[in-house]
Structure formats: C-alpha cells, structure tokens
Image (cartoon, rainbow, N blue to C red):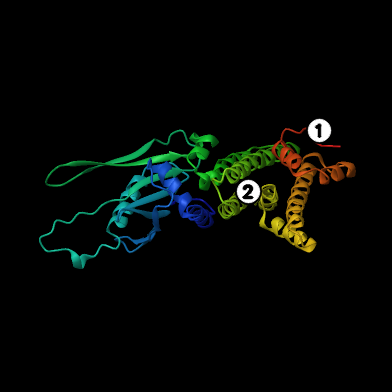
Amino acid sequence: MENGEKNIIHYDKILKNLFNISNRLTICAINALFKKDFKENAKIEQLNREYIRLDKTTAIADTVLSIEINEQKTKYHIEFQTINDRTLIIRMIDYGFRIAIDNLDYSKIKPDEEITVEFPSQIIIFLKHNESIPDELNLTIKMPYTEQKIKYIVPTFKIWEYDPDYYKKKKLYIMLPLRIINLSEEFENLKKRKLQEEERTKLQNEYRWKITEVIVSIIKELKDALKTDDLIIEECNKILLELSTLAGELFNEELKDIEQEVNEMAKMIIDPEIYRRGFEEGLEKGLEKGIEKGIERGVGKGMAETIIRQLCKKFGELPSEYKERILCQDRPTLELIAENIFNIESLSELDRFLKQ
C-alpha cells in the first residue's frame, strides 16, 4: 500500500496480520478473491514481501503467498489501496516481475535454455468507497521487434460492494474488520464542516453510535460463525484484536475510548478472561457441574456488565433497579438485549426484554 495515510505503518501491519490469522482462513480468502476452490487444508506459504528495485530502493508488497497442489506452486499477490491511483498498475507490474524472479536460481539455467518466468496472480483490494474505481486496472505493453501488444490486467475488489451475506458465504471473516474503514472517511468529512459546538457534539455522538452499530454487527457475525464452527475461538480472538486495533487507529484521536469499547463489546461473544474466571470459580466447587455453572456465570456477568455500560452511554446513568435486573438475567436474555441494543430507545422498551 503506497498512499498518504497518516497511520500507514500500523495500517499495513493490521492488513498483514489479518491475512495471517490462520492458513485455513487465508485459503478461504484466496478462493473468494481469485475464484479458486482450494481445499482448506491445502499447503500454503507466506513469501518474501521485500524487493530491491533497479534504483536500489525497497518495494514492500502487502501480501505474497503460494499455494502448493500436487507439488506445483502458484503465487498470489494482494495489494490494499485506499485511493484511486492510475499509476498503481505500473507498480503492480513492477511487483509482479520482482515476485516472479524472486528465488530464481540462475546457476541452473542452461546456456541454450529459453527462460520463462511466471507472474503471480494479482488483485487490488480497495478499502475506501469511490465510484470511479474500475473492475480492473489494465495497461498495454508494446513489445519491440515483434510489435506484439500484451495487455496486463489486474482485477479489483471493492469491499463496499458486498453485503455481509457474501462475506459469510465465502468465509471472508478476515476481511470483516475492513468494513469500518469507510466510516473514518465519513467522520473526516464531518470534522471539516463548519458547525456550532453544540451541533457538532450532537453529530459526533450520533456518529459514535453509527460506528458502534457497525462494530456490533461485525462481532455478531463472528459470534454466529463460532456457533456454526466456521471459526474457532483462536481465529475469532485474533480477528477481534485486529478489529480493536484498527478502530483505535482510525478513530482514537476523536473517540478516545473506542478501542476499549470494542474490547468490551467483544466480551459479549467469548472472552478468554471471562472463561478463565468462570472456570476457576467452578474449580472451587470441585465438581464438573460446578465448573460448567461457574463458566456460565462468569460469561453472563461479563455480558451484563458490558450491556450496563453501553446503556449508560446511551441513556445516561441507569437507575439502580435496572442495573440489578440486568445482572440477574440469564445468558439467552442478555444475548437478546445485546443484539437489539440499538433498537432500544427507552427504559420502557428495555422492560420488554427483561424477565422479572
């Protein structure tokens, strides 16, 4: 990624981390992006991303990997981009050639052998909404002597064009955190508007809820994936970590506690610390049944505390009777409240979800 992002170093690290969550999820992403059907247990290898250009400067690609099938390796190159840069196709050719010749063993090339280099399959993932971005970038290369014209094509993937059902169907869970990137652009536009302080504060608070709503929807999709075994807990936690980090990078300047807020909302799914506390509580009872109850109680308490904090941010300080009632609810009821928290506009509406 080569652009003017102020957090480019951290941004690139997050994107790299997402494509290193697990080999299985990375293969799912390759299948979706490149229209392949590799098995989830296919042999995959992360390749070198740094290349020396002819001018001795270093080019760092976002993600380069290979998948091996029947001892045949195919290379894939993924670049992430936020702006529509027409020169990007030239950089993609440069990257493609560097990747193609990387680790080429010149000593094994025979004097009379015709040299063939295989370019990687490439794709550019655009992160920020822009209607002018084409479905593919292309450039025509006119060869000397033969006058042959070669059309170099790199397809694009625009994350805003796909709804959550598509990501779920294709198991593109590692790309779910990227959905919040476009919200940062909207927030930047809000900051540029000339507004009275009272109106600005009101709009910022509304926007905070919009950001939170999208984050909650991502967390819910991860939760559903855990239930259907499309994700395992280790994968889910790593995705949540990158979601939290990305939210902090994008919004922490104005929304100081957004990263902490993501972490709190994540506890509504599964948090290892909550499980650990519940497990220890169960161990004190010394019985398997006690362990199970301890775990359930620990999870429920953590969810209830998080829901109370979220409702206090929405309505102000909650009456103590409501806090006590929420803390007494069972886990299915707490999950129902968490999933509908943005639709609850008053305490009377909250009453409909609470058991007596």
In 3D space, how far apart are the residues under numbered discs 2 and 1 (Cα atoms)?
Answer: 28 Å
Q: Is residue 85 visible?
A: no
Q: Amino acid at mark 2?
A: Phe
Badges 2 and 1: C-beta atoms under 8 Å apart? no
Residue 242 appears left or right of 73? right
Outermost residue, left direction?
112
Q: Quadrant of the C terminus?
A: top right
Q: Secondary structure at mark 1?
A: loop
Observer-side mark, 2 or 1, equals: 1
Q: Could you tell which of marks 2 and 1 lies nearer the N-terminus? A: 2
Q: Which residue is more in the foreground, 266 or 85?
A: 266
Pointer 1: what residue? 346
Q: Residue furthest bottom?
A: 107
Determine whether, in the image, residue 250 is placed left or right of residue 298: left
The residue at 37%/51% (across/down) is 77
Q: Residue at x 78, y 49 (%)?
A: 305
**Is residue 271 among what the camera can see?**
yes
- Crowdedness of circle 1 by 10 Å Cα count: few (<14), some, many (20+)? few
Instruction: Tell me the quarter of the picture where residue 196 sits.
Output: top right
The residue pinned by badge 2 equals 251
* Residue at the image point whose x is 40% and y is 40% from the top: 156
Image position, residue 48 (x, y; %): 38, 61
Q: Amino acid at mark 1?
A: Ser
- Please tell me which residue lies in front, 161 or 36: 36
Residue 40, position as x, y percentages in the image:
44, 49
User: Residue 135: which quarter of the image?
Assistant: top left
**Percent from the top left, x then y, of residue 12?**
49, 54
Provide the secondary structure element on which disc 2 rests.
Answer: helix
Horizontal and vertical percent for residue 213?
A: 66, 39
User: Which class describes the residues within 10 Å of circle 2: few (<14), some (14-19), or many (20+)?
Assistant: many
